[in-house]
Image (spheres, helix red, strand yellow):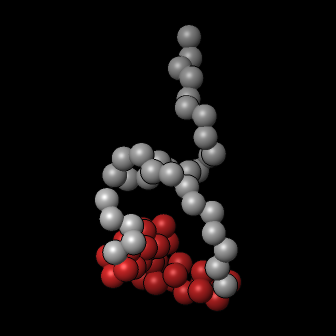
Amino acid sequence: MAEKKKAGRPGRKPPAGGPKKQLLTSLDPEIIKRIKSAAALRDTTASLVMEEAASEWLERHQDGKK
């Protein structure tokens, strides 16, 4: 009997580092382009760039303490 694959979108990899949740937001298209370009130059993902930026912002503002 064939094994069943997990449901999900084809081509999508699960995020590294354990379970994560998705956050939908709207940004200026030029900013999105710059984030993706900067991520590619650093051999990382736009998602990781945004996570790092959000973490740094929260550290500076002390609003989202764990």
Instruction: Locate the N terminus and report the quarter of the image it occupies.
Output: top right
Inspect this view and state whether residue 66 appears: yes
Residue 9 location, x and y as percent?
63, 45
Inspect this view and state whether residue 52 appears: no
Res 60 quadrant in image: bottom left
Instruction: Locate the C terminus and report the quarter of the image it occupies.
Output: bottom left
Residue 50 location, x and y as percent?
46, 73
Q: Residue furthest front?
A: 63
Image mark count: 0
Give the residue displayed 63% in from the left and 69% down from the top: 25
**Towards the viewer: 57 or 47:** 57
Residue 47 location, x and y as percent?
48, 67
**Towards the viewer: 33 or 28:** 28
Give the residue displayed 45% in from the left and 51% down from the top: 20
**Towards the viewer: 34 or 65:** 65
Give the residue displayed 56% in from the left and 17% down from the top: 2
Residue 26 location, x and y as percent?
67, 74
